[in-house]
Amino acid sequence: MGAPSELAALLVIDMQNGFLHPDGSIPRNDKPMLEVERVVAETVDLVAAARDAGLPVIYTAHVFRPDYVDVPSRMRVRDMFNQDDETLVKGSWDAAIADELKPLEMDPVVEKNRYDAFLYTELELILRALGVGRLLVCGVATNVCVESTVRSAEQRDFEVTVASDCTSGPAEYHDAALAAMAYIAADVVPWRAGLFAVA
């Protein structure tokens, strides 16, 4: 793909009701995210600051068909998804991005059904079309979709920074995931330092 460009973007991963809200399907049926209210508040500030700095803001949303035919087999075995709950079903309240972080009309929203936001999506096409070579990443869950996407971005030769205070995951995995990303795939810093570095 050649050398990364100098342009940067903010990538907001899966900040959806299903992951963040106390009534969301994941907190109710699996492990709750760490310090969600603080992380959402910090991410609201990060998105506003990124817009002020002229960075494109790109969202991902983890969604499934109502019949769950597109749910990966390992997730199906864990029985995390059922039609009664509409767990992350496209168009449902559970799948919607949290009100505090609603995308603007101009913001691309990349829908995905795998942890890695590049897999089977148009994310890379969008980033290349925008001339983006550097990413500031935030979102949930730190140890699943954030880490999977960060590793994939690094392998595609994007320069990646993770906003450590704008990510959340289950308490027992969160810090280890940040450390793993810092070791091999990204700079991991609080969002103000990260925005300063990429903007």
Image (cartoon, rainbow, N blue to C red):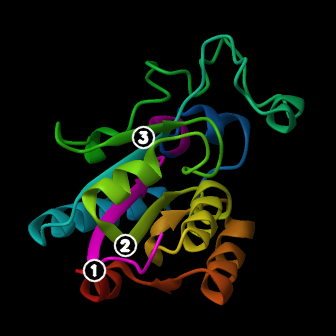
Q: Which residue is the site of mark 1?
A: 6
Callout 1 amino acid:
Glu
Of tags 2 and 3, which is closer to the observer? 2
Q: Which residue is the site of mark 2?
A: 133
Callout 2 amino acid:
Gly
Q: Which one is in front, 9 or 180?
A: 9
Res 47 quadrant in image: bottom left
* In this picture, residue 56 sits left or right of residue 141: left
- Mark 2 residue crowding within 10 angstroms, few (<14) / some (14–19) / many (20+): many
Q: Position of residue 187 (x, y in %)?
A: 50, 86
Residues at discs 1 and 2 in contact (Cβ within 8 Å): yes
Q: Which residue is the site of mark 3?
A: 110
- Is residue 66 visible in the rendered image? The answer is yes
Label 3 vs 1, first from the N-terminus = 1
Magenta stretch containing residue 4, yes or no? Answer: yes
Determine the residue located farthest toward the right in the rendered image: 77
Badge 1 marks a residue whose secondary structure is: loop
Highlighted magenta segment, given as a residue range: 1-19
Q: Which one is in front, 169 or 4?
A: 4
Q: Position of residue 14 (x, y in %)?
A: 48, 46
